[in-house]
């Protein structure tokens, strides 16, 4: 899934189309490496690596506490070869 909001469209990410509940995701990273960015309603939390800048996942605005993952961060998957699903984030 690709979101067309002002932030996501500039990053060009391919996110998971499925929203992942908190009990189905395990986030592992060194202390202090994961940073967040919020804008607009400040409900969604966009997480990124403070060392390399890669956007890793987002806690969604419509389902707080649930996540979408940047599929480009999954080594076994070529996210650029997936069919595009455009999410209308501009009109939320």
Image: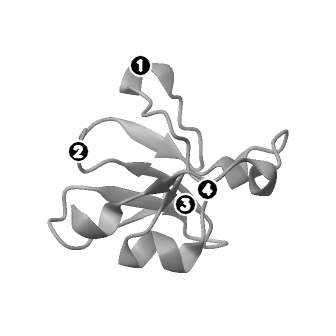
- Looking at the image, is mark 3 or mark 1 earlier in the sequence? 1
CA gap between label 3 and label 4 equals 22 Å
Of circles 3 and 1, the one toward us is 1
Of circles 2 and 3, the one toward us is 2
In the rendered structure, the answer to whether residue 62 lies left or right of residue 6 reads: left
Q: Is 77 located above or below residue 3 in the figure?
A: above
| Residue topped by disc 3 | 33
Q: Is 74 located above or below residue 35 in the figure?
A: above
Tag of residue 14: 4
Looking at the rendering, which quadrant does residue 80 occupy?
bottom right
- Report helix, strand or loop for mark 1: helix
Within-10-Å neighbours for mark 4: few <14, some 14–19, many 20+: many
Asked if the residues shown at circle 4 and circle 2 are in contact, with their CB atoms under 8 angstroms apart, the answer is: no
Tag of residue 23: 1
- Looking at the image, is mark 4 or mark 2 earlier in the sequence? 4
Within-10-Å neighbours for mark 1: few <14, some 14–19, many 20+: few
Question: Residue 29: horizontal and vertical position, in percent?
Answer: 59, 46
In the rendered structure, the answer to whether residue 78 lies left or right of residue 58 reads: right
CA gap between label 2 and label 3 equals 26 Å
Looking at the rendering, which quadrant does residue 88 occupy?
bottom left
Which residue does the image show at 47% across and 69% down from the upper left?
A: 8
Looking at the image, the residue that sits furthest to the top is: 23
- Report helix, strand or loop for mark 3: loop
């Amino acid at each position: 899934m690709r979101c067309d909001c002002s932030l996501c469209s500039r990053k060009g990410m391919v996110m998971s189309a499925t929203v992942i509940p908190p009990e189905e995701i395990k986030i592992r990273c060194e202390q202090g490496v994961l940073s967040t960015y919020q804008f607009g309603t400040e409900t969604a939390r966009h997480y990124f690596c403070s060392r390399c800048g890669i956007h890793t996942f987002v806690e969604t605005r419509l389902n707080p506490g649930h996540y979408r993952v940047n599929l480009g961060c999954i080594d076994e998957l070529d996210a650029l070869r997936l069919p595009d699903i455009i999410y209308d984030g501009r009109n939320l």
